[in-house]
């Protein structure tokens, strides 16, 4: 896909991000059929409405198009350390393509790791904003357990279950991704500014809305499809009837992802929505081990049967340095690995999770160690030298 | 089946109740193939062990047979108001035949109602002895709700969930059956003597062990198959891993009955066994309505589609008197119905649940009223006169 210069595909998708609302399938189909640059050209031209679009809607889209400033969005993003990733980029998570015409036009990303690598082995942990102590406890414990097993925890950055999930993963020195319903440079909710900045430092903050854009009720709902599509499965921790987390769970179901629920007292209104799911297709999970048993590869239960490890030559230099810093025969803590790779700890963690997704390393207690295959491949490499 | 006189089938089954342990399938097959009287004849004769039985086991059975005193058992039972029901009797619940050779030889019964009628529309509510406050609350609420919907609650009379289930049903003026792992004249546990006597007054206390016999660990386990077989489904309220209630649930599953579980906190060891079931075939239930939705007839959701009502002529005189005491156009309380039928309240309740099983009456708030079909059949009866 061509670059971000005016008139290019990337530039056009940034432009359209100001015009087409997240998850708009009519807009998505138009972009798929005509191409983003052509859609921009038509919006800026004086032509009539394309087939299937009312004159009113066409006028509305053109009014929005007049206010689009892709160069400014890119400049604001660059200043905030935010990059824009589009389909076809190496970092684009192919799992999003399952959304069809509701696929995001692109994603704005804050944080060091590769979104694609990280989400290869990720699970969504979502739930009620106004959760109970029990819900917060379960979200944190579950997410810490997932992090300890080398899984990436994806959630929505909201109060309640989401926040507890992110904090649980971070607290276990693990990887977490927040998917926002607003510009990633403007954390929402405000009370989570510190948390979201911490996630951006140690993990990833992503979203489809352009810098500075604000959330709306429908954007919250449509954000959930991205969470569902990015991950191998969604765990709902607490949710009342008609909760937004149920939307995420049902989106996951439609996308063929695993849907899971944490049980709670039958007397708790905040477990009623989860129990509704569990009376349908969702699987009851009590802890991280049961989640991993479901979403993991076959190899999850028998590590020796894991797929082949990629040749080291294909790794990016940063990842190669981190891999080289791991001792051959024992686990090492992140600070030791970071020193050995001459980088900071957050960068080391970002690369370790990528290496984890590729099968090179695994978590071992608080630290990390080479997998059996990685050790074997080191020997192979040496023999070939 | 022939009567209780010495040498008869009923007498022989009482005799064998002192010899063969509950659920013994070898003994059950022997009785099925040779007949109970013939098995007694061989045990009392001096012959060699039958094929498939070791000499030791044969000697053990014969030693037990020497101490069998059916006449004495019958006399003790009669004094305690206990009857003995065997396969082929009108009161024998045909559902027990699903147990095959593990079917009880017979059942000792305390209480007025017909066991067969009552268990036609019954649900087992079982669980941990050392349950939590939450478990006791759920057992009581669920059972009260089942009773209010005209369902009979079957349980094991134990401390904890069982006791709460019986009390919940009784508290709602409903029907309950305790299945004991000991003689029904000698309630166990001792701390439940009053409760079990109350169940015998207002409902039924049944068991396969002869009068005065004591419970053993294996008898508790084997009692559970009777609970599972008698009912349309089993709800486990709280159960730790490896709990006896899970045996009941798995027996219910094997028998093709519905298996249900009440969720609890994932952090509660007393819900762990239930969650294990819910991760398998069992259905999560939050309340009585969800239980009835599962175990009820299709007609449960659409009362007008219920099956045809039996002609009144086939009803026993007691039931016919109670039916006649119900007003045509409104609900009536039990005391009013009992006065009208010239009987005591407990007797009236016993008959009302039988009539409920046959589709004549239904619960209405605290009282009872004729079903639509019953009203129609009264009109039909009048027209035919």
Image (cartoon, coloured by chain):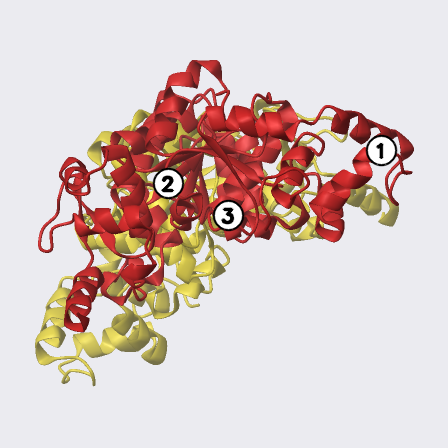
Chain colours: A red, B yellow
- Specify whether A39 is left or right of A94: right
Vertically, is A71 above or below A87? above
User: What residue do we see at 39% from left, 49% from top?
Assistant: A117
Picture coordinates of residue A369 (x, y %)?
17, 50
Secondary structure under tag 3 reads loop
User: What residue do we see at 32% from left, 55% from top?
Assistant: A315
Picture coordinates of residue B160 (x, y %)?
29, 33
**Label 1, on which residue?**
A58
Can see residue B210? no
Dot 2 or dot 3, earlier in sequence: 3
Picture coordinates of residue A35 (x, y %)?
72, 49
- Specify whether A48 is left or right of A61: right
**Residue A113, labelled with which disc?**
2
**Label 3, on which residue?**
A92
**Closer to the camera, B256 or A40?**
A40
Which chain letter matches label 2?
Answer: A
Separation of residues labelled 1 and 2 (CA atoms):
39 Å
Secondary structure under tag 1 reads helix
Res B139 → quadrant: top left
């Amino acid at each position: 896909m061509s670059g971000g210069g005016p008139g290019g595909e990337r530039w056009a998708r940034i432009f359209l991000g100001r015009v087409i609302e997240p998850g708009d399938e009519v807009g998505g189909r138009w972009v798929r059929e005509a191409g983003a640059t052509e859609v921009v050209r038509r919006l800026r031209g004086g032509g009539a409405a394309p087939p299937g679009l009312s004159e009113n809607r066409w006028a509305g889209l053109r009014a929005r198009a007049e206010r689009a400033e892709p160069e400014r969005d890119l400049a604001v993003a660059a200043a905030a350390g935010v990059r824009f990733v589009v389909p076809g980029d190496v970092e684009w998570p192919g799992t999003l393509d399952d959304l069809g015409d509701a696929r995001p036009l692109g994603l704005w990303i804050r944080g060091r790791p590769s979104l694609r690598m990280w989400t290869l082995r990720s699970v969504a942990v979502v739930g009620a904003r106004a959760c109970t102590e029990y819900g917060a406890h379960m979200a944190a414990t579950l997410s810490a357990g997932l992090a300890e097993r080398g899984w990436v925890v994806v959630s929505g950055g909201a109060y309640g279950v989401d926040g507890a999930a992110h904090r649980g993963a971070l607290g276990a020195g693990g990887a977490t991704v927040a998917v926002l319903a607003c510009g990633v440079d403007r954390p929402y909710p405000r009370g989570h500014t510190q948390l979201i900045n911490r996630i951006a430092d140690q993990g990833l903050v992503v979203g489809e809305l352009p810098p500075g854009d604000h959330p709306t009720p429908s954007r919250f709902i449509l954000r959930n499809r991205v969470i569902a599509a990015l991950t191998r499965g969604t765990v709902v921790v607490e949710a009342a009837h008609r909760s937004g987390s149920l939307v995420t769970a049902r989106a996951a179901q439609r996308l063929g992802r695993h849907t899971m629920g944490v049980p709670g007292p039958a007397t708790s209104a905040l477990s009623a929505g989860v129990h509704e799911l569990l009376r349908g297709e969702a699987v009851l999970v009590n802890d991280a081990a049961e989640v991993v048993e479901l979403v993991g590869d076959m190899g999850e239960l028998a590590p020796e049967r894991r797929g082949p490890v990629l040749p080291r030559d294909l790794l990016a230099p940063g990842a190669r340095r981190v891999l080289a810093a791991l001792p051959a025969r024992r686990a090492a803590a992140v600070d030791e690995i970071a020193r050995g790779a001459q980088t900071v700890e957050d960068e080391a963690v970002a690369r370790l999770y990528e290496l984890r997704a590729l099968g090179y390393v695994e978590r071992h207690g608080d630290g990390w160690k080479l997998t059996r295959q990685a050790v074997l491949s080191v020997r192979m490499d040496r023999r070939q030298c």
